[in-house]
Structures are given as structure tokens and as C-alpha cells.
Image (cartoon, rainbow, N blue to C red):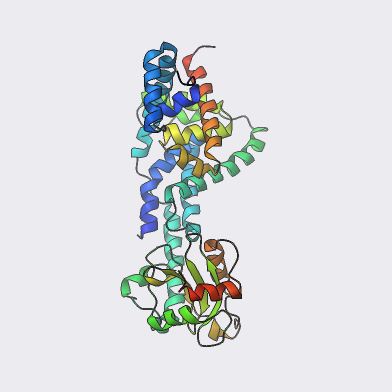
């Protein structure tokens, strides 16, 4: 186990949590996490020592998801998605799983770019600068996506309007 | 009274993103204004709710993909064999080499504290210009993204990219030499070396004049 693999293993649980935020589906999140880990191992030569490893790995997972979501959008035009399938076998106790499912359904209704900003800051706890680094956007862009996402979620979860 | 505080600023305050002076200003404004207080509370509660709902996921251990570990170990063993058969001779060029490093993947190294170079090779890197003939040939010189001067070279049994750090020339990439193979007479023709350079380089390689100037400055 070298330093690279150690860093990746340490980060994997958080990558998987980020994957939950992006995919809003426990099974998809597990699959995406494994594929991101494989990709990171294969691409290890591209990681620049001295740069932020976490941001690099988050970026790999996020870019894989963009590819997946794009191809899935085409598929879903033919096959309707199975609603709430992830409630079965979701991690944690039933109440926590139900709460998470509820929040993931709310995140479904956000545009992709707002959802990923919300997931990185509110779920992963990244700073604005770190989140902007992962998404490769200017800090101002990250902030405005985050604020719009938060406003939309506040409306949905507040039950009003 | 300063300019009114918008929702973006309140959210940034909740997220701990404001500088101390601005944070104090928002804190005072929130304390004085019930509408701002509600807004701040809404965003604080929402953030806490997401963190609580998803937080436990990160407590669950995740294994590296198992098939990948095997194939990765195999690839690494394969690369290790490729490097360290000629590497016995390459070792004479590289100081600070010890058995533990044989376990490391060859090719592009992923560590900043990569091997220090032997004095003999380091001297050539100090003085020799790109394209000059000799047992060690420098293919090109360039500035890396971290600002260091780096040089890709081909020695008899070792191709590499070394960068000048405070500690001297440090090997950032190494592969078995291609120069003696006949098929690859051109220094710098190893595609893996080229991609290592491409991953490190900032801008263009140095031209002859810039290279001489860098040499005058001791590659600092």
C-alpha cells in the first residue's frame, strides 16, 4: 500500500457520500464510487504531487457521473425510472434512510450545476474555494449556483410557496 | 448604516466563508433584524439537516475495487520488472536507491521526494545543453507548473525527467533506457516520458537562448 492508495482509501467513504448527493440513489452511488476508484488508480500518473488530492478525486467522480447521467438521460426516455428503489437496503437505520431519501428527492429537482454545488458544500463540507476547484469554475460562479440551489431547496423543504 | 445585507452574504456567513470584519457586521445585522435572523436560521438548519442525513455515509468503510487491486498489483509488478532488469545498471546513475523503492511503481513517480540524482548525472544536467551528444543527452528543458526548471534526458540505461529543487536535481520520472535499443535513437522519444513532460510543463519548452540563460542562473 503506497501513499497514493492510502490517500484514496482514506477518501473513499467521503467520495461515496458525494456520490449519494450526485446520484440520489444508493446503488448508483456505490457503483459510481467503485468506478471512480478504478479510474483514479488508472489515472494516478496524472495526479500532480503537491496539488489537492481530494479535489482531484472528487473531480474524477463528478466527471464520471456527468458521462453516466448523459447516457442515462437517453435511456430514461425509453424506460421510466423505478421510483424509490433505493429505499431497500439503504445504509443506516430506516428513519435516517427515509430522511436521506426525502432530501435526495428534493435534490432531484435542482439543475445539475446547482445540485453539485450543494452536495460539495452542504454535504461534503468543502469551502467555496475547494468546491470551485473541484468543479473547475470561478469562485463567483460556484457561489451563485450554490445560492440559487439553497434558495430552491429552502422553498421545497419549507413546505411553503 | 452600511449597504443592506443580501441572502448570498447571509449564506456565506452561515457557511463560515466571510472574513472576520464582515462576519461581525453580518452578525450584528442578523441580531437586529428578525427577517435576516429567520433567513440565517433557515439556511443554518438546512445545512445541518443535510450534514446530519448524509454524514453517517462517510463513516462506512469502502474497499478499493478488488479486481483492480489485483490487476494494479500485476501491472506494477510488470513495470517493476521492466525497470529493474536494466535498473541494476541504472542504479549506478541514481544515488539514494534502496531496496524499498523497488516496490514502487516505475514510470511516473507520484511523490515529491523522488530519488535524488547521482552527482555525475546531476553535473551533466547542470552544464549540458539540449541536443549535445554524449552518454547522457538532454532532450529538452522546460519550466514546470511549480516553477522549477526541469530537463528530460536519456542516459545509457535510464530515461528520465529531473527537476532542479533546493536540494539539487530530483528525479520526477524514470524508465528503463531506450537509447541503447537502436529503435529509439532519438532522445525524448519515449511516449511515457513525453506524457510525463506534458503533465508537468508550464507553457513551451525553453529555446536555446532561454536554456543558456537558465544555465547561467544555475537553473534557479
Query: Which residue is located at x 46 percent, y 21 percent?
Result: B2
Outermost bottom residue:
B134
Pinpoint residue A158: horizontal percent, then vertical percent. Answer: 47, 15
Q: Is residue A106 visible?
A: yes
- Residue A138 placement, left or right of B9: right
In this view, B68 is above or below B141: above
Total marks shown come to 0
Locate residue B10, reporting x and y percent.
44, 24
B63 vs B102, nearest the viewer: B102
Q: B147 left or right of B111?
A: right
Q: Confirm whether residue B160 shows in the render.
A: no
User: Residue at 57% of width from left, 71% of height from top?
Assistant: B210
In the displayed image of the protein, which residue is found farthest to the front? B1
**In the image, residue B190 lies at what x, y percent?**
57, 74
B170 or A99, nearer to the observer: B170
The image shows residue B27, relative to residue A117, as above or below, that is: above
Q: Name the image quarter holding the C terminus of chain B.
A: bottom left
In the displayed structure, would residue B74 be above or below residue A109? below
Query: A110 or A65: nearer the eye?
Result: A110
Where is residue B1 shown, x and y percent of the image? 45, 18
Q: Residue at position x 36%, y 28% from top? A: B52
Classify A29 as above or below B81.
above
Q: Residue at x 48, y 53 (%)?
A: A40
Amino acid at each position: 500500500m503506497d501513499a497514493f492508495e492510502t490517500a484514496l482509501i482514506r477518501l473513499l467513504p467521503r467520495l461515496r457520500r458525494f456520490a449519494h448527493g450526485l446520484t440520489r440513489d444508493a446503488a448508483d452511488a456505490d457503483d459510481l464510487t467503485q468506478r471512480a476508484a478504478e479510474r483514479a488508480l488508472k489515472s494516478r500518473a496524472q495526479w500532480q504531487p503537491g496539488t489537492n488530492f481530494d479535489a482531484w478525486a472528487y473531480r474524477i467522480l463528478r466527471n464520471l457521473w456527468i458521462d453516466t447521467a448523459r447516457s442515462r438521460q437517453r435511456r430514461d426516455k425509453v424506460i421510466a425510472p423505478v421510483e424509490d428503489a433505493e429505499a431497500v437496503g439503504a445504509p443506516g437505520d430506516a428513519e435516517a434512510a427515509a430522511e436521506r431519501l426525502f432530501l435526495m428527492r428534493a435534490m432531484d429537482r435542482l439543475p445539475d450545476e446547482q445540485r453539485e454545488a450543494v452536495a460539495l458544500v452542504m454535504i461534503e463540507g468543502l469551502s467555496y474555494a475547494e468546491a470551485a476547484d473541484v468543479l473547475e469554475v470561478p469562485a463567483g460562479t460556484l457561489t451563485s449556483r450554490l445560492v440559487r440551489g439553497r434558495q430552491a431547496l429552502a422553498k421545497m423543504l419549507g413546505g411553503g410557496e | 448604516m452600511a449597504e443592506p445585507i443580501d441572502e448570498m452574504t447571509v449564506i456565506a456567513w452561515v457557511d463560515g466563508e466571510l472574513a472576520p470584519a464582515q462576519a461581525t457586521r453580518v452578525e450584528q445585522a442578523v441580531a437586529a433584524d428578525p427577517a435576516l435572523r429567520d433567513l440565517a436560521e433557515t439556511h443554518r438548519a438546512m445545512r445541518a439537516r443535510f450534514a446530519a442525513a448524509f454524514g453517517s455515509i462517510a463513516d462506512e468503510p469502502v474497499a478499493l475495487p478488488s479486481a483492480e487491486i489485483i490487476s494494479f498489483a500485476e501491472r506494477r509488478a510488470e513495470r517493476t520488472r521492466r525497470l529493474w532488469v536494466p535498473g541494476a545498471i541504472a542504479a549506478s546513475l541514481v544515488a539514494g536507491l534502496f531496496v524499498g523503492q523497488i516496490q514502487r511503481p516505475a514510470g511516473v513517480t507520484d511523490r515529491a521526494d523522488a530519488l535524488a540524482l547521482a552527482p555525475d548525472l546531476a553535473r551533466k544536467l547542470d552544464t549540458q545543453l539540449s541536443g549535445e551528444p554524449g552518454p547522457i543527452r538532454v532532450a529538452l528543458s522546460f519550466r514546470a507548473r511549480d516553477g522549477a526548471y526541469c530537463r528530460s534526458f536519456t542516459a545509457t540505461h535510464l530515461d528520465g525527467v529531473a527537476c532542479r529543487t533546493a536540494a539539487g536535481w530530483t528525479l520526477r520520472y524514470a524508465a528503463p533506457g531506450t537509447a541503447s535499443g537502436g529503435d529509439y535513437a532519438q532522445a525524448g522519444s519515449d511516449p511515457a516520458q513525453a506524457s510525463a513532460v506534458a503533465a508537468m510543463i508550464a507553457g513551451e519548452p525553453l529555446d536555446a537562448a532561454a536554456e543558456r540563460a537558465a544555465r547561467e542562473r544555475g537553473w534557479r
